[in-house]
Image (spheres, helix red, strand yellow):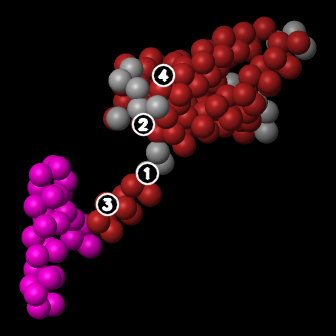
Amino acid sequence: MERRDFVKYGIVTTASAASFWGVQLLNPQTAAAAETAAQARPSLEAALARCLQTGNACLGHCITELGQGHQEMGECNKTVQEMLATCEALLKLSSIKSEHAKAQMKITAQACDNCAEACKKHSAHWGHGMHLACKECFDACLECAKLCKVA
């Protein structure tokens, strides 16, 4: 077999196998564009991890404020705990490629929206450098909810 026959045979075999397995072969430009697009938007897992991180900081802030008698932090405390529970559940389900992840995304999106709404009530203080943990949590929840809704 000549070299060009070997190359031809390899291309045909690869294309046939890809077709059999339902794989689309991308040209290098399309593959690069797809990779760039994927890198440009944060992944759901990264958004969930950010929600967990900022949510725990917000929860600590809420507990401190409640301990000082600031009862207005009660709703924020409740919603951030719910958000943390749903984000953790979704992160676990998505990491094992569970069939239940899609249903959990709807619950997580709602919990993130509720948490963001509770955090937003403290937005008047953000400009004064107060309740910044709530601002970080608010931003993370909005991004996570958005990704849960489009996934």
Residue 132's disc number: none
Which residue corresponds to mark 1?
41
Dot 4: what SS? helix
Which residue corresponds to mark 4?
108
Please name the predominant secondary structure of the magenta segment in the image. helix
Which residues are drawn in magenta?
Answer: 1-30
Mark 4 touches mark 2? (CB < 8 Å):
no
Mark earlier in primary sequence (4, 1): 1
| Mark-to-mark CA distance, 1 and 3 | 11 Å
| Mark-to-mark CA distance, 2 and 3 | 18 Å
Q: Quadrant of residue 16?
A: bottom left
Provide residue 148's location: percent of width, then percent of height.
41, 31
Foreground label between 1 and 3 = 3
Dot 3: what SS? helix
Which residue corresponds to mark 3?
34
Question: Is residue 73 found left or right of 51 in the rendered image?
Answer: right
Identify the residue at image location x=21%, y=70%.
Answer: 27
Residue 65 forms part of the magenta stretch = no
Foreground label between 2 and 3 = 3
Residue situated in front as seen by the camera: 35 or 125: 35
